[in-house]
Amino acid sequence: MPAIQITGLRKSYGGFDAVRDVDLTVEPGRVVGLLGPNGAGKTTTLHVLLGLAAPTAGQALVQGRRHGDLDDPARTVGALLDAGGLHPGRTGRDHLRILTLAAGLPAGRVDDVLEIVGMTPAADRRVRTYSLGMRQRLGLAAALLGDPGVLVLDEPANGLDPAGMRWLREMLRSFADGGGAVLLASHVLAEVTQVADDVVVLGQGRVITAGPLDELVRDASLEDVYLDLTATTAGVR
Ligand SMILES: Nc1ncnc2c1ncn2[C@@H]1O[C@H](COP(=O)(O)OP(=O)(O)OP(=O)(O)O)[C@@H](O)[C@H]1O
Ligand SMILES: [Mg+2]
């Protein structure tokens, strides 16, 4: 069973199709990059997958189920959406403690995930003092709390420096090599080509092209396809 299976997904807002006819599969052990210009429908797709928005048509399943039907969502899928929802006056550690309590996870996971994302030294500082990259690492720590087999990440490399980028790449690689599945949305081609095994290119809500990264780079010259897409559609609708 695929870890993530999206079929015929459409999401409209007042007659406007933010996403249309999207098919996408993430098998265990794979990192799939959802690449598209601003406004292409990446975040909308992830929102439907995570049960934050209802599909207009089609479906988006995690481990064969809609997110809302999962027995134990926190242990099944970890998500990083945007790092904006953090309480500025709380410490990073407290933020993770609250999430751990809410999800019924063992308290010891907090230290584990802080260590994994390299945030142990800053764990007791207030979030308001964090840099963008540190917030992003905290968000990744939160996604890892339930030790899930599936990660859904929206623009995870935002704000990461080159060392942070390399760390993210290696972390996702070892996660996938251990049988995990990753769906990562980004508007930055280089981020996707650095970490993804498979790529789905989204433009104006539709799948423009999809396949294994090496094939797309070789056969379609992914860079040209993406440059054309960003130039001609200008993404934002
Ligand atoms: N709640 C909403 N109501 C109305 N329109 C929406 C809503 N959410 C998204 N849209 C529209 O759907 C389209 C896709 O937006 P989405 O956020 O999915 O794009 P994206 O690919 O994530 O872009 P970005 O790279 O800027 O994050 C946009 O035109 C956006 O304005
Ligand atoms: Mg987005």
Image: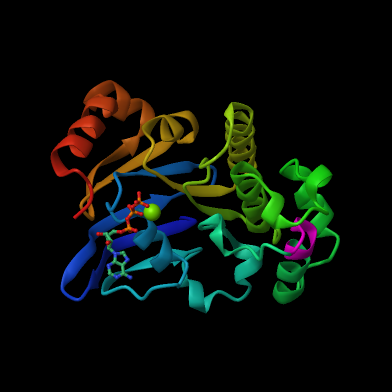
Bounds of the magenta segment: 90-95
Q: Position of residue 65 (x, y in %)?
A: 47, 71
> In which quadrant is the C terminus drawn?
bottom left
State the image quarter where residue 17 is shown: bottom left
Q: Nearer the viewer, residue 43 or 61?
A: 43
The residue sitting at 61% across, 55% down in the picture is 149
The residue sitting at 63% across, 73% down in the picture is 72
Does 9 sit left or right of 171 as displayed? left
Does 15 sit left or right of 184 as displayed? left
Q: Is residue 198 magenta?
A: no
- Against 216, residue 88 (above or below) is below
- Against 229, residue 22 (above or below) is below
Our reading of the magenta stretch's main secondary structure is helix
Q: Position of residue 126 (x, y in %)?
A: 75, 57
Q: Position of residue 116 (x, y in %)?
A: 75, 44
Does 35 sit left or right of 99 as displayed? left
Q: Nearer the viewer, residue 39 or 48?
A: 39
Q: Is residue 92 magenta?
A: yes
